[in-house]
Every structure is written in structure tokens, then in C-alpha cells.
Image (spheres, helix red, strand yellow):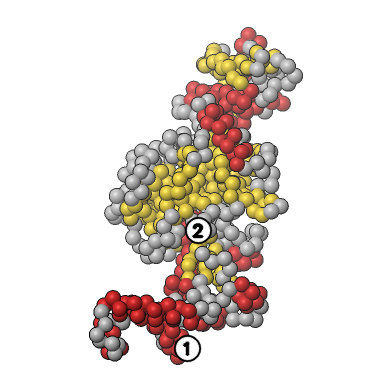
Amino acid sequence: MKHMGTARWLMIGILAVFLSACATLDDETRVEDRPDEGLTAEELAAIDEERERAAARAAEGRSSLEGEALDELLDDPDSPIGRRTLYFAFDSSDIREEDMDIIEAHARFLADHPDQRIILEGHTDERGAAEYNLALGERRAQAVKRALVLSGADEDQIRVISYGEEKPAELGSDEDAWAQNRRAELVYRDVF
Amino acid sequence: MRMRLAKALSMALALTLYPALGKTELVIEITGGAEAAVPIAVVPFGWSGDGSPPEDIGAIISNNLNRSGQFDLLPQEEFIERPTRREQISFGNWRALGVDHLVIGTVEQEGDRFRVSYQLLDVFAGSTLSGRRYSAGRDDLRTAAHVISDEVYEELLGRPGAFNTRIAYVAISDEDDGRRWRLVFADADGHYPESILTSREPIMSPAWSPDGRRLAYVSFEGRRSEIFIQEISTGERERVASFEGINSAPSWSPDGSRLALTLSRDGQADIHVLDIDSGETRRITEHWAIDTEAVWSPDGRHLLFTSDRAGGPQIYRVPARGGEVERLTYEGSYNASPTLSPDGEQLGMVHRGDRGYVIAVQNLDGSDFRILTQGPQDESPSFAPNGALVLYATRENGRAVLGTASLFGDRRQTMSTQGQRIREPAWSP
């Protein structure tokens, strides 16, 4: 949440700030904020708790998508989260220029649905040391995670898992298969 | 032979838990020549018993000696005679064929036991160098052949053989209801493969404990990499590392009390050492680059590992308690997967060169760098416990198979099983 540079984020931020108010407001703000100065600390805490619950209830149903609503978006290639695979050059974890719009679309979606969680899988081609590739796969997924966070997603929405060369998308041993396998995948289904 | 009971137990366990594993047929091919190899002939063993012998002991010994790359075996079609007892030998015949040594023997059935006897003879002196008699059950006949191979090897070369040892590897197969990863262990020549773990998610990096009784490995069964230790004879297993991020590349300390491993819980892949009993970890390297694939020096004082801190992956050394990092490889732009010979003097690795990815060896000080294999996709080197062979993963007609390469000459052997992709082999102590 350190990069709330866009107007979009400010709007979504209202809900997020409300949700985390108890944790982030300091005592000074709290006094200003509250007319009921005669209340005990216990009563104040109870009121805070009730506010938090109300906020959570209000957010329910729109802070994340589930079931058919999510499936529909995932299955539609033209939806903002329809494209979920990014490809990499050999031994590289640099995100390609043409993939930036995929990143931005997912970051926007995640920012709009703050309870949505995803897994970011990092993969490599089969060549070279398997353990080194496992670390390289993680580096790729971490690069995508950083880009998503810079574009507005929250760090806590994204979990990185590297599979290295262990789960190729294509089984062949040629340039085409290798290019298909050097990838990061954004996974929305069965997360956590 | 001690391992047999353990094998029988784990076999029973594997069958109970995972009935799907069928008998896999092993295909073995040997190529390449041998330099300064000992010329030897192994005569087919005589047989007395019902029907035909259950195992061809002579052929097992021949294959063992051949793939070591240190023997030059006279082909059977050049044999003039096939003695099975010493008094049947005409040493002059064998001298004329240029053979220095001869192995003869017999297998006699006695009920459900088999008596295996052999003699190793010096053709020029006309004398017996060694000879023994073993009694074995049907399932131990191959082991008897491996023990005899070890005795011949040691008698003639002055160092222990490693034929009666085991290997572990990962076998991947595509079945009707999805892909399966199996953790398999087998005899060093690839026979008697037994699966000790079957999973629908990847298994990686098996590593033998120094006593040969346990395997550490990486499993993704929890949808992420985690490290397990499994007792081979009982199947009992324990999850020992499951931190945020990568948990991988386990390697046992020589005293068996610690595991070196790769963790990325601090945001980057670094080498850590885990004390197995206490579960405490200690961070050994700290670098933004990838540090992984640590292995211990035989004296337990150093860890060798792969790092891309200089750009591409190269092999480095660090004191096992942490400290100054020293680069060991300079040949080419890609050297990874370090493996040390049992004496700690030779460093094996995956090297990328003109032929793609090959297995190479150099002295620890960087001298005498040489390439052992053909490429183009050779990986996961692992020394035999006597240092004479390197086991590795390779490709043959596009299939993932196991290979062994001799440190002496350019002899190579591949081992494959039908319908399985074989990866990440590790040779037992």
C-alpha cells in the first residue's frame, strides 16, 4: 500500500483505510475523531470493534470474486484477467515490454478486489541444473510480484511459488517448447 | 546383503501403499572405449540345477567391469574355450588372445539355495589371485555377482569397487489419470528398482544420508517445495523444512547430523544449515544472487555451492560455519550442480559448452578440467562411492535416462526404463 499514486487507488483506499483504522490511527487522531470523550478504554475498544465488523460486512461480496463470477472472467480471454501467462527470455527474469498491460490489468483487478488472493507460479525451461532453475523460477515470479505491487496490488494478495523446470507447459525439447515453458502464471483458482 | 531385508520391507510397504507400480524393464547400453584398461575375460559361469540359471552371473560381472571403464573385456565370440574349473584352462589360449586375467566360476542349485563360486586367475603366471564361494537365495544372486565384481575390481586395481551399492532417482510417468512422480531406489546397475514414494506433484533432489539408510528430498505435495527425510526400510518420513519460499537442495553433513539446504525465506535463495535434531537453522550465505545446490566437503569443513553472483552460475566454496566465499570454477559461462569425489579432490559439475550441457570434472584447485560426457542435456552428476564413475541424467533419442561415465577413458553406459522419464540420480555411500 506504499504506492497509492493513482486516483483509482485513492478511491479504493477509503475502504482499506477504514478497515485498518484501528491499527493505523494514532492517539491524537483518535481523540479528534471521537466526540465521546467520557468513554472508558474498554468501551472505545468495543466501538472500534463494531465499526470494523460493519466495514467487513459492507465489503463482503465485492472485495473478492468466487465461483461462477470468477470462472466467467477467467474463461473469457478478453476479460481483464483473461491472460494469465507471461513469458521470459533464456536465463532472464526481465518482464517484457509487451506484457506490462497484462500486469497492469491484474494489478487493477486485485486493487479493486482487495480480498482476492492469487498464486504466482514461476517456471523455467528444462535446460541446466534443476535446483538452479527452481531459484530462477522464483526470481521470475518475484519480478512479476514486484511489478504487480508497483501497479497497485497489495503484497499480501500474492503468494509466490516456484516450480522451476518441474512442471513444463510443453513436454518437447526444442526452442518452441522451451519458450513456452519459461513463464510465470497467475493462478486465481484454488488459492490457499 | 545387509540391505536385502530393508529392501524387502520397503518393497512390501511400497506395494501396500502404491499398488500401481508395475515391473519396469531396464535397457542398458554401453558405448565408448577405455584407456589403459586391464584386458580380462569373464567366462560364462557353469550351471548345475533345474532348467536354466535364474541369473547370468558371468554377464552381470562382465557388465559391471565393462562400464567402470577400467577393464577391456574380451568379447565372447573370440573365446576358444569356456572353462568353468581351473583344470580345464589352457592358459596359452588366453595369452594368445591378449588377455591378462580370467574370471571363471560355477552356480550350483541346492534346493532353493544357490552355491556361487569363482576364481580370478593371472593368465601369465597361471595362478589363482582370488576365489570364493557364496551361498545365496534366488533374490540374492545379483548381489553375489556384485560382491564378486567388487572383489575382482579391488584385487586388480587396488581400490574398493562400488558395484554392490545403490542409486536413487526420480521417475516421472504419464498415466491414465495424470502424471506421477516416484522416488525410486535401485541397485547401482539399475536393477531391482523400487518406488518408496509416489506423488501427483513433483519430487526433486534425493540425497542419501551418510549411513545409506535415509533419503532427504524435495516434495511439492503441499503445493510448494518442502524438504522431507524418509527412512528407506520403514517408509517413515518427516517434514524438516517448510519455510516461506523455496525449501530445496538438501545435502547431508558427513556426520549425518545436519542438512545444508536452500531457503529463500529472506527473499533470495541462500544456503542455510539445518540441525536435524533441534530443527535450528543457520544462514551461511547472504547475497542478492541465487545461492543453491550446496554439498559438503568430506571433512565437513566447507560447503560448495552454485551462485550466479558473477552473472552466470559458477561454483563457490564457503566455510561450513559461514565466512569468506571463494570461486572455484572459471571454465566457460555456466558451471552448476557441484559434486565432490569421495576423497574431496575432484569437483564434478554441469558445464555448458559447445556441445550444450555436459558433465565435467576438474581438480579442486581448477586444474585438469575435462569433459566426461557428450551432451547436449546432461545434468545432476553424482560420484560413485569409490570415485571411479559419475552417475548423471541424460537424454537418449529424446528420452530422459540415466548415464554413467568413467573417470578413466570415455566409456559411458545408459540405463532406461520403458514409459518413464528418469531424473536427478544420486549414488549411495
- Dot 1 falls on a residue whose secondary structure is helix
Contact between marks 2 and 1 (CB within 8 A): the answer is: no
Q: As shown in the figure, which amino acid type bears the numbered disc 1?
A: Arg
Asked if residue B85 can be seen in this view, the reply is yes
Q: In the displayed structure, would residue B116 be above or below residue B299? A: above
Asked if residue B98 can be seen in this view, the reply is no
Residue B189, how many percent across, how many down? 59, 35
The tally of labels here is 2
Q: Which mark is residue A8?
A: 1
Residue B334, how many percent across, how many down? 48, 58
Tell me which residue sits at (62%, 34%) in the image.
B191
Report whether B31 appears left or right of B253. Answer: right
Residue B94, how many percent across, how many down? 63, 19
Q: As shown in the figure, which amino acid type bears the numbered disc 2?
A: Arg
Nearest the viewer among A3 and B51 is A3
Residue B401, how many percent across, how many down? 62, 46
